[in-house]
Image: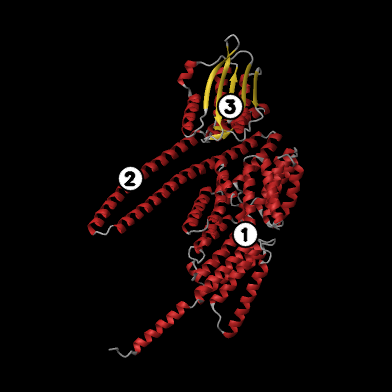
């Protein structure tokens, strides 16, 4: 028998019906999705420089203002309505930031910051976070734009870092977490600007992790590849940098015009620092054409391109074109108060004046500067190179040597950063392997539990899995300890090498000797200092391009020539089909062979002395021969394998283990027609595409 419905039952049914109607209503969720989608469309159009986007943004702002006025008259206005207006104004600020008048964005952004701080009775100032996710996203975007303005024009680097960090913290508590990787990339760029390479690497790695964990499209990694390339370029690890630049180039068509210009600019810097000025010129001209084609001829990127072109033209000896580029770019940086960019312009002026022997112009430029903050290491290093020519022209070898020591300190800091980066990379790979192993074990355990129906079997399997897990964890612990010990040993070896190859006492002795020597002897000592510095740099690399090895050998011979006398003849013969800039050999191999020929063959030899280096090709193999006219090769001494030949044989043995095509090395005596020994010849055969 059915009972009569009570009032309580009726009220419950009404409440359920109302909740069902609300849950089926598309208003709240759909409106939020439509709002986010419209804002995302505006951002994509702004990034792609769509001509009609300004009209669309202004139309949205006008419609929202009209809605606000109508609701205000009806007294139905909400905080969400006001927030929508500020979000559209944020889009307008982004548009102006990428336009010819970025200063128009400043007032809008400051108004938005003030708006956020007024909400909920000053909630943000009290709690350092906003009361809603939307407000957090709005404040984060405003801080990003303010930080980017400072970053581009090299203003207040510490404040820039603080704003980017605060923006990242707010995005973590916002409804646009997909913007986190870009925030990390911006923060990494800011660390690069203050010469903190390990800090920049940390934030780029975090960005890569966020792209993966948030399930974002692969194209989101494009800017991160560019950033990693820039880090390796800053460390002068050109091989790793080129890998990431090549990876970025594959996605070039997917980039926005601004990111395309950013990528090409960094690629031009890569060729500049590798001293391939012809490719650097072609790359910066490519950037110039892109900016003109995309209607960005009056934006910051064009002026940056022109000042970089000025430096490349200078290094190519095209001084008139270098001056012209400076005339086009300097006024813009002066107008915006970019002290760092003006410092770079003055550096190029100094280089031009020094090359023309115009000492008065160099002094005028130096007097005109009033530096207010520390300049980036790379720019200071470039200026020191240009000033060294000027000091040597004036005979001021003391100042020239001081500049050389400044560059040595810069290179030492790079080596320190390289050591930290190598250790961090090893531990990062180990952590990734550990996480993957944990994940695999968890899946295996779960599958075993699902497949087992019987309680006893389940318990037995569980115990077995637990025991196995404990065993694996114990093995992982032992492995981690071993790996940590290896990392510690590696760091000790690196520090030991750095201590061994940083003979500051030697440079102090040379410095004192230079100050007390005449002009000719001082010049000889300067050559020796350069030789020592180059030797230290090259000995820290696993391999080196052949053209750099040849340059170092020529520098080494220039110093040794004083000890060998006037009757010494040296030459390098390179076959036309050999591109020495693309052939890699183990670092210092050619120097070791040259030194062996001089020490064991030519020193102490009476009469005419000869040393020949011949480089040729045979199919896919580069052949390097070092020959002399000394007393010949002592087989008994060779069997003992001195330090030089021992290094060569061990390096070749290790390298050949990991390569299909093998390196070959042999040393033999040269004989005349009568069988008399007339010298020694060492031959090194290096296949193409060998991996070191």
Where is residue 341? Give x, y as percent: 66, 51
Q: Circle 3 — which element?
A: strand
Q: Secondary structure at mark 1?
A: helix
Q: Position of residue 677 (x, y in %)?
A: 57, 12
- Secondary structure, mark 2, is helix
Place residue 295 in its image quadrant.
bottom right
Q: Which residue is mark 3?
A: 623
Residue furthest to the bottom in view is 4
Q: Earlier in the sequence, mark 3 or mark 2?
A: 2
User: Residue 496, percent across and down?
Assistant: 46, 35
The quarter of the displayed image where residue 139 is located: bottom right
Quadrant housing residue 380: top right
Q: Residues within 10 Å of mark 1 (few under 14, many from 20)?
A: some
| Residue nearer the viewer, 404 or 552 | 552
Q: Is residue 18 above or below residue 161?
A: below
Q: Is residue 567 above or below residue 323?
A: above
Q: Nearer the viewer, mark 1 or mark 3?
A: 3
Q: How is the image coloured?
A: secondary structure
Q: Is residue 87 above or below residue 692?
A: below
Residue nearest the viewer, comparing 685 with 572: 685
The answer to whether the residues at label 1 and label 3 have Cβ atoms under 8 Å apart is no
**Residue at horizontal 58 percent and vertical 68 percent from the top:** 39
The residue where tag 2 is placed is 475
**Mark 2 in CB contact with mark 1 (< 8 angstroms):** no
Instruction: Indicate which disc, 2 or 1, sits on the residue closer to the N terminus.
Output: 1
Cα separation between marks 1 and 3: 54 Å
Q: Which residue matches tag 1?
A: 149
Of residues 414 and 278, the one drawn nearer to the viewer in this rendering: 278
Query: Neighbour class for label 3 at 10 Å: few (<14), some, many (≥20)?
Result: some
Dot 2: within a 10 Å radius of its alpha carbon, few (fewer than 14), some, or many (20 or more) residues? few
């Amino acid at each position: 028998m059915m009972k009569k419905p009570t009032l309580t039952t009726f009220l419950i049914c009404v409440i359920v019906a109302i909740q069902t109607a609300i849950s089926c209503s598309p208003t709240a969720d759909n409106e939020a999705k439509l709002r986010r989608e419209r804002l995302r469309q505006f951002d994509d159009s702004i990034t792609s420089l769509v001509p009609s986007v300004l009209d669309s943004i202004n139309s949205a702002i006008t419609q929202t203002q009209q809605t606000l006025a109508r609701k205000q008259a009806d007294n139905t206005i909400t905080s969400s309505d006001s927030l929508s207006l500020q979000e559209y104004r944020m889009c307008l600020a982004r548009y102006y930031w990428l336009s010819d008048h970025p200063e128009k964005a400043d007032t809008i952004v400051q108004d938005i910051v003030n708006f956020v701080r007024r909400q909920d009775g000053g909630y943000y100032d009290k709690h350092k976070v906003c009361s809603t996710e939307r407000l957090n996203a709005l404040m984060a975007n405003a801080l990003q734009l303010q930080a980017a303005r400072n970053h581009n024009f090299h203003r207040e680097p510490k404040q820039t870092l603080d704003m980017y960090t605060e923006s990242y913290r707010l995005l973590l508590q916002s409804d646009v977490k997909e913007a986190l990787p870009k925030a990390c990339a911006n923060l990494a760029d800011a660390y690069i600007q203050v010469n903190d390479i390990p800090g920049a690497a940390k934030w780029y790695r975090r960005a890569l992790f966020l792209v993966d964990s948030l399930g974002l499209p692969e194209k989101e990694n494009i800017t991160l590849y560019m950033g990693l390339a820039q880090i390796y370029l800053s460390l002068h690890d050109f091989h790793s940098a080129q890998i990431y630049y090549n990876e970025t180039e594959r996605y070039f068509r997917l980039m926005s015009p601004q990111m395309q210009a950013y990528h090409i600019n960094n690629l031009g810097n890569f060729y500049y620092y590798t001293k391939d000025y012809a490719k650097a010129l072609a790359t910066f001209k490519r950037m110039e054409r892109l900016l003109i084609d995309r209607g960005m001829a009056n934006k910051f990127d064009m002026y940056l391109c022109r000042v970089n072109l000025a430096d490349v033209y200078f290094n190519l000896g095209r001084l008139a074109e270098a001056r012209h580029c400076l005339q086009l770019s300097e006024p813009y940086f002066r107008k915006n108060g970019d002290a760092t960019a003006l410092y770079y312009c003055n550096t190029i002026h100094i280089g031009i004046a020094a090359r023309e022997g115009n000492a008065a112009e160099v002094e005028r430029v130096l007097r005109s500067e009033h530096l207010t903050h520390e300049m980036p290491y790379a720019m200071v290093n470039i200026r020191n190179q240009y000033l060294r020519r000027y000091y040597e022209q004036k005979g001021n070898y003391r100042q020239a040597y001081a500049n050389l020591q400044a560059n040595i300190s810069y290179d030492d800091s790079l080596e320190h950063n390289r050591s930290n980066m190598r250790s961090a990379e090893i531990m990062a790979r180990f952590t990734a392997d550990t996480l993957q192993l944990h994940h695999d074990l968890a899946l295996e355990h779960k599958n075993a539990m699902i497949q087992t129906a019987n309680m006893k079997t389940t318990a037995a399997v569980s115990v077995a899995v637990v025991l196995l897990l404990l065993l694996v964890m114990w093995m992982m612990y032992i492995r981690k300890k071993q790996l940590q010990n290896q990392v510690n040993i590696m760091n000790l070896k690196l520090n030991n090498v750095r201590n061994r190859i940083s003979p500051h006492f030697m440079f102090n002795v040379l410095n004192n000797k230079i100050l007390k020597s005449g002009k000719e002897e001082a010049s000889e000592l300067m050559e020796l200092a350069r030789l020592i510095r180059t030797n230290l740099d090259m000995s820290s690399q696993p391999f080196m391009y052949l053209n750099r090895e040849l340059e170092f050998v020529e520098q080494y011979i220039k110093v040794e020539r004083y000890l060998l006398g006037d009757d010494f003849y040296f030459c390098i013969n390179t076959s036309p089909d050999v591109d020495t800039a693309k052939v890699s050999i183990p670092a210092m191999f050619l120097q070791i062979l040259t030194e062996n020929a001089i020490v064991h063959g030519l020193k102490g030899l009476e009469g005419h002395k000869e040393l020949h280096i011949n480089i040729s090709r045979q199919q896919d193999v580069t052949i390097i021969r070092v020959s002399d006219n000394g007393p010949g090769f002592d087989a008994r001494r060779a069997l003992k394998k001195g330090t030089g030949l021992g290094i060569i044989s061990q390096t070749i043995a290790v390298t050949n283990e990991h390569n299909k095509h093998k390196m070959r090395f042999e040393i033999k005596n040269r004989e005349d027609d009568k069988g008399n020994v007339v010298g020694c010849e060492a031959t090194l055969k290096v296949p193409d595409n060998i991996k070191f």
